[in-house]
Amino acid sequence: MTTEATRGQYVEVDGARIYYEEQGSGEPFLLLHGGLMSSAGWAELAPLLATRFRVITPDSRGHGRSSNPSGRLSYGQLADDMVALIAALGLRRPAVGGWSDGGQVVLEIGVRYPNAARALVIGGALSDFGAEYQDAMRQVFGTEPGMTVDAETIEATLGEWMSRFRAMFAGDDDAWRVFLRQSVAMWLDYPGLTEAELQRATAPALVLIGDRDDLVPIEAAVAMYRMLPNGELAVCPHTTHALPFTHAAWFAATVREFLDRHMAA
């Protein structure tokens, strides 16, 4: 069984060109990256999962090598894109997983398209983007409702991760600033999901969280797990929102065990 990644390919989706790679064989598993990142962020983790699954790692609209002619980002649009990618690749109810923004997209897929995936892996995400969370985010970025967040503020806030994020744009500062503004607008404008909406996500769903996650309170992840009809919960000890990168082996083993139970034909 090979785990070598295939050469990247593109699929046209709602006017955008969506880039993806794949490796491994077996049941298909669509793995979605976090905000401001690309599929390149899965370089360490994807091979660990590809020993058991056909791992497909796309770049979300506007991220990495994927285009975004719409000029805006939303979790709903990203979910629509991924379901269209599933159809374009001829996949029949694959597993779908993601981390951070990728986890939010997986949650949206589960709610909007209950029959699209056989199993969901929702990592580093939360359903309640209510006033308290929005206020906290606005404090982080130093903005008020209706204000535009400048790129310098975002860069200062994101700190040590900036070099990884900015590498996607290869020195194109204008494109980078546009992308930052689109991403922050998506975070600040997202209303979240109600308990009634979460009830639509009927596929088996694994909620993953680090016990020291600095962006998603563990209490919020537990609350979401309890609202999902077929939710399961896994908490990684002594780790932050960087869980997939600092604890890749734990992440892969936990996901493999979950998918092995739910992906049998």
Image (cartoon, rainbow, N blue to C red):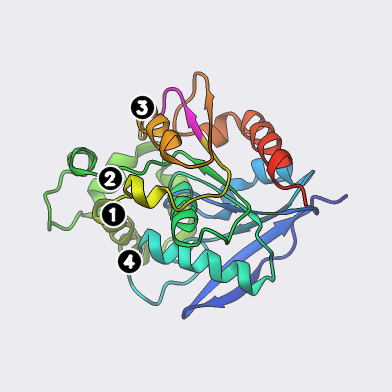
Cβ–Cβ under 8 Å for marks 4 and 2? no
Magenta-drawn segment: 208-214
Q: Residue, x 37% and y 34% (percent of image)?
A: 216
Residue 129's label in the rendered image is 2
Q: CA distance from mark 1 to mark 2?
A: 7 Å
Dividing the picture into quadrants, the one containing residue 244 is top right
Task: Tell me the element at label 3.
Answer: helix
The amino acid on which the numbered mark 4 sits, given as a three-letter code, is: Asp
Mark closest to the chain's N terminus, 4 or 3: 4
Image height of 17 relative to 177, above or below? below
Mark closest to the chain's N terminus, 2 or 3: 2
The amino acid on which the numbered mark 3 sits, given as a three-letter code, is: Glu
Cβ–Cβ under 8 Å for marks 1 and 2? yes
Q: In front: 256, or 199?
A: 199
Task: Tell me the element at label 2.
Answer: loop
The amino acid on which the numbered mark 2 sits, given as a three-letter code, is: Phe
Q: CA distance from mark 4 to mark 3?
A: 38 Å
Q: Residues within 10 Å of mark 1 (few under 14, many from 20)?
A: some
Q: Residue, x 71% and y 47% (percent of image)?
A: 263
| Residue marked by disc 4 | 174
| Residue marked by disc 3 | 219
Q: Measured from the top left, where is residue 38 in percent x and y?
A: 52, 55
Task: Tell me the element at label 4.
Answer: helix
Q: CA distance from mark 4 to mark 2?
A: 29 Å
Dividing the picture into quadrants, the one containing residue 146 is bottom left
Q: In front: 31, or 229?
A: 229
Cβ–Cβ under 8 Å for marks 1 and 4? no
Q: Is residue 127 visible?
A: yes
